[in-house]
Amino acid sequence: MQKSEQINELAAALAKAQAKIENATKSAKNPFFRSNYADLPAVWDACRAALTANGLSVVQLTDTSENGMVLESVLMHSGGQWISSHYPINPVKNDPQGLGSAITYARRYSLMALVGIVADDASDDDGEKAMGRDNARISEMTSAEISEDAGLTRRGHFKAEGLEMAQLGSEALANWWKDLLVPDQRALIKYKEETLKPLAQKIDLTLKEKA
């Protein structure tokens, strides 16, 4: 996270806004997991009024880094203070649709994390349940090729999910990997070794330094 020299006014305004921010409604459908999720418009609906009423705004811009494209999300206060975060963008397909899907996915999760939004009935998709999903149900996903979740492919969902686990560290990544079906592990092994594993190791080092 990066921030302005002072964030006291921003922190006070965000505290007031969070008292009014609502849970994001899970109105969009994910056919792969037979569940609903809160899409980007629902996330904005949950926070826009509360942020605006307290002099807060969010800007999300794409940028490049040594590791590829990232989304930078900046929470700004009318007094000039700000905080920002970065989220890696890894499109499943290297075409405009794939890139747009990955950016939408990154915008949704970054916004939720930045201002403290949770989806309604969030217990439906906490980390433990996601990693303990039923493999028989997952095997049925092979008949579906495109998800309504920003057009991500089935394997694209697993890539995005793995990215989230990697950002929790090597242990979370290992536990997630064990629950994948063997065909998915084979298809994603290169992505795991080249992208997820190095990221998880960096997180481990960061956590160790902070301890």
Image (tube, helix red, strand yellow):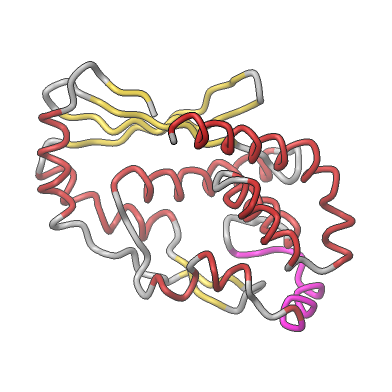
Q: Residue furthest front?
A: 211
Q: Residue drawn 83% across and 61% down?
A: 184
Asked if residue 181 is positioned above or below residue 174 in the image, the reply reads below
* Number of disc labels: 0
Span highlighted in magenta in the image: 136-148
Is 86 situated left or right of 165 in this image?
Answer: left
Name which quarter of the figure residue 84 lies in.
top left
Q: Viewer-proximal residue, 111 or 128?
A: 128
Q: Residue drawn 55% across and 73% down?
A: 129
Task: Characterize the magenta stretch by its predominant secondary structure.
Answer: helix
> Is residue 146 located in the magenta-colored stretch of the structure?
yes
Spot occupied by residue 152 in the image (x, y as percentages of width and height): 66, 55
Spot occupied by residue 2 in the image (x, y as percentages of width and height): 36, 24
Spot occupied by residue 65 in the image (x, y as percentages of width and height): 59, 20
Q: Residue furthest bottom?
A: 136
Spot occupied by residue 41 in the image (x, y as percentages of width and height): 38, 56
Q: Residue drawn 44% across and 36% down?
A: 211
Name which quarter of the figure residue 179 lies in.
bottom right
Q: Quadrant of the N terminus?
A: top left
Q: Viewer-proximal residue, 40 or 187?
A: 187
Name which quarter of the figure residue 196 lies in.
top right
Q: Viewer-proximal residue, 94 or 73?
A: 73
Is 196 situated left or right of 80 in this image?
Answer: right
Asked if residue 70 is positioned above or below residue 126 in the image, the reply reads above
> Is residue 65 located in the magenta-colored stretch of the structure?
no
Is 110 situated left or right of 29 in this image?
Answer: left
Asked if residue 136 is positioned above or below residue 168 in the image, the reply reads below
Q: Residue drawn 60% across and 64% down?
A: 148
Q: Viewer-proximal residue, 198 or 7?
A: 198
